[in-house]
Image (spheres, rainbow, N blue to C red):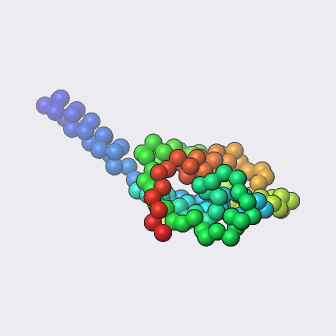
């Protein structure tokens, strides 16, 4: 009987860990244009690991030319993050401690860099928006945005539009 009780407690604890709900219902990261050939896109990742990439320009090619600005937008794509990539994203988002960060890290002296917006929607429905550009910001925030860029690069995107 003692062993049965121990087994039931162990199984109960295991089921609690595996059904843990994410603190975040969505993470959106939008990168605007720069005075050059910077990737322009918006990626949204939900708590089911589904990712939508709204790619405007320079997301799938290196370099660029002035003629590329006359081409149509690259399209809308979808992918599902691996459990490992999603876990890394959650760890980096937790480390950034989003709720304590400033709403803006825009450096007005740097005019030619992309403007970036990060929006984190929490499981309770609250949202936190952070505007950024090149310049100083907390390292944990830089780590998070770098990870999102890496995740964007390593997905097998399927075009939907």
Q: Nearer the viewer, residue 124 or 143?
A: 143
Residue 106: image x %, image y %? 77, 60
**Displayed quadrant of residue 8:** top left
Residue 111: image x %, image y %? 83, 62
Q: Is residue 34 visible?
A: no
In this rendering, the count of numbered labels is: 0
Of all residues, the one furthest to the front in this rendering is: 67
Q: Is residue 103 left or right of residue 89?
A: right
Of all residues, the one furthest to the right in this rendering is: 109
Q: Nearer the viewer, residue 83 or 98?
A: 83
Q: Nearer the viewer, residue 138 or 1?
A: 138
Who's the residue at 78% across and 50% down the image?
136
Of all residues, the one furthest to the left in this rendering is: 1
Who's the residue at 55% across and 52% down the image?
152
Identify the image quadrant of the N terminus.
Answer: top left
Can you say whether 69 is above or below 27 in the image?
Answer: below
Q: Is residue 81 visible?
A: yes
Who's the residue at 78% across and 62% down the image?
35
Q: Nearer the viewer, residue 40 or 27?
A: 40
Residue 60: image x %, image y %? 59, 55
Can you say whether 121 is above or below 94 in the image?
Answer: below
Residue 74: image x %, image y %? 57, 64
Q: Is residue 92 left or right of residue 4?
A: right
């Amino acid at each position: 009987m003692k062993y049965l009780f121990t087994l039931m407690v162990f199984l109960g604890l295991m089921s609690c860990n595996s059904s843990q709900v994410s603190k975040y219902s969505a993470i959106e990261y939008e990168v605007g244009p720069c005075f050059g050939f910077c990737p322009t896109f918006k990626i949204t990742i939900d708590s089911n690991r589904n990712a939508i990439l709204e790619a405007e320009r320079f997301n799938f090619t290196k370099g660029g030319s002035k003629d590329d600005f006359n081409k149509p937008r690259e399209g809308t794509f979808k992918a599902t993050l691996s459990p490992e990539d999603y876990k890394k994203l959650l760890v980096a988002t937790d480390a950034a401690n989003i709720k304590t960060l400033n709403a803006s890290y825009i450096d007005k002296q740097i005019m030619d860099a992309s403007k970036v917006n990060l929006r984190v929607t929490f499981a309770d429905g609250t949202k936190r928006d952070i505007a950024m550009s090149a310049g100083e910001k907390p390292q944990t925030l830089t780590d998070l945005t770098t990870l999102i860029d890496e995740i964007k690069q390593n997905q097998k995107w399927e075009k939907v539009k």
